[in-house]
Image (cartoon, rainbow, N blue to C red):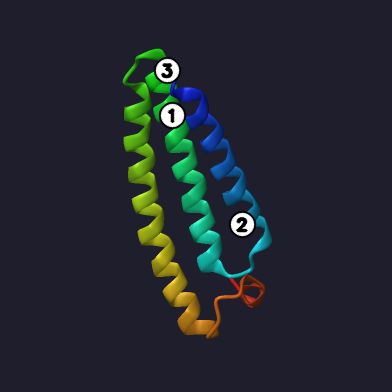
Amino acid sequence: MLSTPALVLAMMLFSLGLVGLLSRRNILYMLLSLEIMLNAASLAFIAGGARWGQVDGEIMFLFILTLAAAEVSVALGIVLQLSYRFHTLDVDAFSEMKG
């Protein structure tokens, strides 16, 4: 019975993260919004696993937790390099990159 409020909360968190990701132009805020979306997906998996009495939700939570840790380490390295190169964290300034 606990899963319905948890799924509603996960839906609200995911929507909040999606709005933040689409509306912000600062790359740090975009990464924070992405983390909120990953946490919402984790909460949905935990609630679904608790509802059906399976451990699959907890296993998926561990995978999402690992993915989030890897994403943070790689993304912050990229953010530091972009900040050093362009002296800003605005996403629109990075369109000048040549490859």
| Residue 79 in the image, given as x and y percentages of width and height | 46, 71
Is tag 3's residue or tag 1's residue first in the polypeptide sequence? 1
| Residue 22 in the image, given as x and y percentages of width and height | 67, 56
Q: Is residue 49 left or right of residue 85?
A: left
Assign the N terminus to one quadrant of the image: top left
Q: Which residue does the image show at 64% across and 77% down from the upper left? A: 93
Q: Secondary structure at mark 1?
A: helix
Which residue is most to the bottom? 87
Q: Secondary structure at mark 3?
A: helix
- The local crowd at label 3, few if under 14, some if 14 to 19, many if 20 or more residues have their Cα within 10 Å, is some
Marks 3/2: CA distance?
29 Å
Q: Is residue 72 left or right of residue 15?
A: left
Which label sits on residue 51?
Answer: 3
Q: Nearer the viewer, mark 3 or mark 1?
A: 3
**Residue named by callout 1:** 45
Q: Nearer the viewer, mark 3 or mark 2?
A: 3
**Residue named by callout 2:** 20
- The local crowd at label 2, few if under 14, some if 14 to 19, many if 20 or more residues have their Cα within 10 Å, is some
Contact between labelled residues 2 and 1, with CB atoms less than 8 Å apart: no
Marks 1/2: CA distance?
22 Å
Q: Which residue does the image show at 51% across and 29% down from the upper left? A: 5
Contact between labelled residues 2 and 3, with CB atoms less than 8 Å apart: no
Is tag 3's residue or tag 2's residue first in the polypeptide sequence? 2
| Residue type, label 2 | Gly
Q: In this picture, is 57 found above or below 80?
A: above
| Residue 54 in the image, given as x and y percentages of width and height | 34, 16
Is tag 1's residue or tag 2's residue first in the polypeptide sequence? 2
Q: Which residue does the image show at 35% across and 43% down from the upper left? A: 65
